[in-house]
Image (cartoon, rainbow, N blue to C red):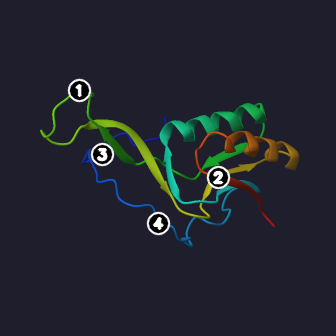
Amino acid sequence: MLYPKCTKYSKNRKGRCSRGCKPDGTQLGFGRYGTKSCKAGRLSYRAIEAARRAIIGQFRRNGKIWVRVLADLPITGKPTEIRMGRGKGNPTGWIARVSTGQILFEMDGVSLSNARQAATLAAHKPCSSTKFVQWS
């Protein structure tokens, strides 16, 4: 799974997702094709893994894929029917903060039509909107 193996502090604050476009991580660095986020938001580690598996299933052992996001922020939750107070809940999952224009996945070693179809399959997994980009 795509989350950290160990962390020094297991509980973070939720924070905000920046709406602006940050310059780092907005250009293709490894592959010829990629998927770029259109909105700022949060991606769960399950959505990232599901999108990665969808891309790999489309490629059928051809090509290479790079995952450019890591879910490194813990999300906590308290059990249902528990009283108020008594501190913060236990970590239940991991999320990644994604800014506008950030590259999520990169692909190489496959044809343009195959990469476009894989990106379309992967776009259905995260809850934010994405678009297909290619290196020029």
Residue type, label 2:
Ser
- The answer to whether residue 28 is left or right of residue 49 is right
Name the secondary structure under disc 3.
Answer: loop
Name the secondary structure under disc 1.
Answer: loop
Indicate the position of residue 126 as horizontal and vertical percent values.
59, 43
Give the mark, 2 or 3, whose residue is nearer the N terminus: 3
Q: Where does label 3 land, which residue?
A: 7
**Nearest the eye: 120 or 85:** 85
Residue type, label 1:
Glu
Residue type, label 3:
Thr
Which of discs 1 and 2 lies nearer the camera? The answer is 1
Q: Where does label 4 land, which residue?
A: 18
- Rounded to the nearest angstrom, the CA distance separating label 3 from label 1 is 29 Å
Q: Residue 81 got which mark?
A: 1
- Rounded to the nearest angstrom, the CA distance separating label 2 from label 3 is 30 Å
Give the mark, 1 or 2, whose residue is nearer the N terminus: 1
- The answer to whether residue 43 is left or right of residue 116 is left
- The answer to whether residue 86 is left or right of residue 53 is left
Mark 1 and 2 residues: CB-CB less than 8 Å, in contact? no
Which of discs 2 and 3 lies nearer the camera? The answer is 2
Name the secondary structure under disc 4.
Answer: loop
